[in-house]
Image (tube, rainbow, N blue to C red):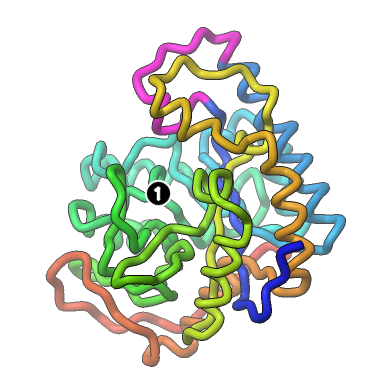
Amino acid sequence: MDSPTDSPSVVLSFDVEEHDRIEAAAGLDCPPSVRLEYADRMERTTRRLLDMLEEVGAKATFFILGEIARTRPRLVRDIADAGHEVASHGWDHQRVHMLSPQGFLDDVRVSKDALEQASGGPVLGYRAPTFSVGRRTGWAIDVLAEAGYQYDSSVFPVRHDRYGVPDAPRTPFVVEGESAHMIELPPATYHTLGQNLPVAGGGYFRLFPLSWMESGLRQLAQSDPAVGVLYFHPWEFDPDQPRLPLGWLAKWRTYVGVGRSSARLGRLLANHTGRFRRAADVACDLRRRIASLPRYRLAPASVPVLSVECGPVTP
């Protein structure tokens, strides 16, 4: 059994979207019956994950598409009623660089409103589809602040062919846009040989042994603030779902290790009992000590002082 010798606070997060909305499926034309099946399977698998979390008393953050709040409002409310955080994953999984600043503002506003109506509580956090907040989209920080968000979890400090800001801080930091800034909670990495290696979840969780993720968490435990952000998707825990017609590389990236994900998550939950925290709670604590956090600028700016007031999170 994997057993960490030390561990940071762990933010367990789930990006909730139907399987046909993943980046690898962009451009595919799925029939309505297939889309409905993926939506049904997304809900069933998310509820199974809620049961797993309840068994160990772990609380998580669910970054949910706003459109799901319209089509499956009971699921969103049940997530909130179970004590988990409901946060935004955008409206319909469009990457930020596919939108204009005004289009992005409309996207995050309507998503926030739909999720708040469904959950009955405030939505404070955002994670971009495919971690698509980076140097090209530094303006997104200003838009998120304008829309009323209090933290972001979209800047992944790695090199990747689809996303990443490799020189961004590995631990929570203040991300600066052009005219505003906010708390950033980057996904977990392992630093070695002068570079950051991704260990936070997704395909890295499915492909590599759990010890790889545990090594990253142990390393982050020596940092200040000692926080490790992990991410998963409900479809990664559904090995019997219909497979999308993807090319060989995208198919391998998407489906490798899906059959062992549930057992591996169970071990992770057992290893870190008592250390799981919701992202909004971590962000609120960090806002109170914002002067001590690293600062990182995605776009040149003169940045105003950030308020330290924290909004409530649905218990």
Quarter of the image where one finds residue 256:
top right
- The image position of residue 253, as x and y in percent, is 46, 35
Q: Give SS at disc 1.
A: loop
Seen in the picture, residue 20 relative to 33 is either above or below; the reply is below
Residue 151 located within the stretch drawn in magenta: no
Q: From the viewer's perspective, tell me whether residue 250 is left or right of residue 97.
A: right
**Few, some or many C-alpha atoms within 10 Å of disc 1 (few <14, some 14-19, many ≥20)?**
many
**Residue at (71, 64) in percent of width and height:** 2
Q: From this viewpoint, which residue is outermost toward the right?
A: 55
Quarter of the image where one finds residue 171:
bottom left
Kindly identify the amino acid type of the residue bearing the numbered disc 1: Ala
Quarter of the rendering occupied by the C terminus? bottom right
Looking at the image, can residue 115 be seen?
no
Magenta-drawn segment: 20-34
- The image position of residue 164, as x and y in percent, is 30, 55
**Residue at (27, 60) in percent of width and height:** 165
**Residue at (37, 25) in percent of width and height:** 26
Number of labels in the image equals 1
Residue receiving disc 1: 128
Which residue is more in the foreground, 187 or 284? 187
- The image position of residue 196, as x and y in percent, is 36, 65
**Residue at (40, 69) in percent of width and height:** 184
Residue 30 located within the stretch drawn in magenta: yes
Quarter of the rendering occupied by the N terminus? bottom right
Seen in the picture, residue 128 relative to 187 is either above or below; the reply is above
